[in-house]
Image (tube, helix red, strand yellow):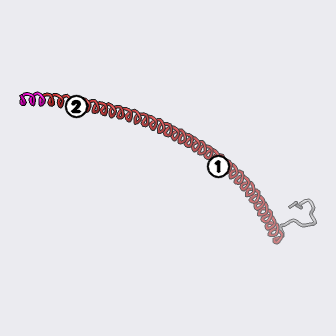
Amino acid sequence: MASHDQSYKAGEAKGHAQEKTGQATDTMKDKAQKAKDTASDMAHSARDRTQQNKDQTGSYLSEKTEAAKQKASETARGTKEEASETAHATKEKASQMEESGEETAQAGKEKTEGTMQRAGEQIKSMAGGAAEAVKHTFGMGETEEDPCNKRDN
């Protein structure tokens, strides 16, 4: 009977071993499932944080880009206004210079006309005096005794 008793004890030990192995396997499966669930939760959490960071970064970049666009637009508008004002001032200055040039030309023309007129009168007077001198030389000139023939020079 010893062999039957040994067989029984061996079977019982085998049953206990299988039960313990089953329990250990179930425990390991539970721990593995918990670890898997924890890893999955951590991955979801990390993905959510990454998405939030991406959204925040996108918003930040969008705001900065919009601010840069607005600043560039304002700068361009200011430059355009400055250029327009400079062009207007240049046009006005050119108009003033043209007017001044016309006035100077007119004054020069008038001065030249006056000078030419005086020169013409001097030449005419000198020619008249020369003609009188020639007439007088040939005895054809007026005498001082004849007041009726006397001319005013």
Mark 2 neighbour density, 10 Å: few (under 14) some (14–19) many (20 or more) = few
> Could you tell me which secondary element the residue under label 2 belongs to?
helix
Question: In the rendered structure, which segment of residues is drawn in magenta?
Answer: 1-10
Q: Is residue 34 left or right of residue 13?
A: right
Single out the residue that lies furthest toward the front: 1
Mark 1 — residue?
A: 94
Circle number at residue 25: 2
- In which quadrant of the rendered view does residue 2 lie? top left
Q: Position of residue 14 (x, y in %)?
A: 14, 30
- Residue type highlighted by circle 1: Ala
Secondary-structure class at tag 1: helix
Quarter residue 50 falls in: top left
Q: Picture coordinates of residue 119 (x, y %)?
A: 76, 62
Q: Earlier in the sequence, mark 1 or mark 2?
A: 2
Query: Is residue 127 toward the left or the right of residue 88 in the image?
Result: right
Relative side of 89 to 74, left or right? right
Q: Nearer the viewer, residue 59 or 4?
A: 4
Q: Residue at x 82, y 69 (%)?
A: 133
139 left or right of 85?
right
Residue 36: image location, x then y, percent? 30, 32
Q: Nearer the viewer, residue 38 or 142?
A: 38
Q: Is residue 44 above or below residue 109?
A: above
Asked whether 62 falls inside the magenta stretch, the response is no
The answer to whether residue 4 is magenta is yes
Does the magenta stretch mainly form a helix, a strand or a loop? helix
Kindly check if marks 1 and 2 are in contact, taking CB atoms under 8 A apart as contact. no
The alpha-carbon separation of the residues under discs 1 and 2 comes to 100 Å
Closer-to-camera residue (144/122): 122
Q: Which quarter of the rendering shows the N terminus?
A: top left
Instruction: Give me the residue at 91% from left, 66% from top.
Output: 144
Q: Position of residue 55 (x, y in %)?
A: 44, 34
Residue type of the residue flagged with mark 2: Thr
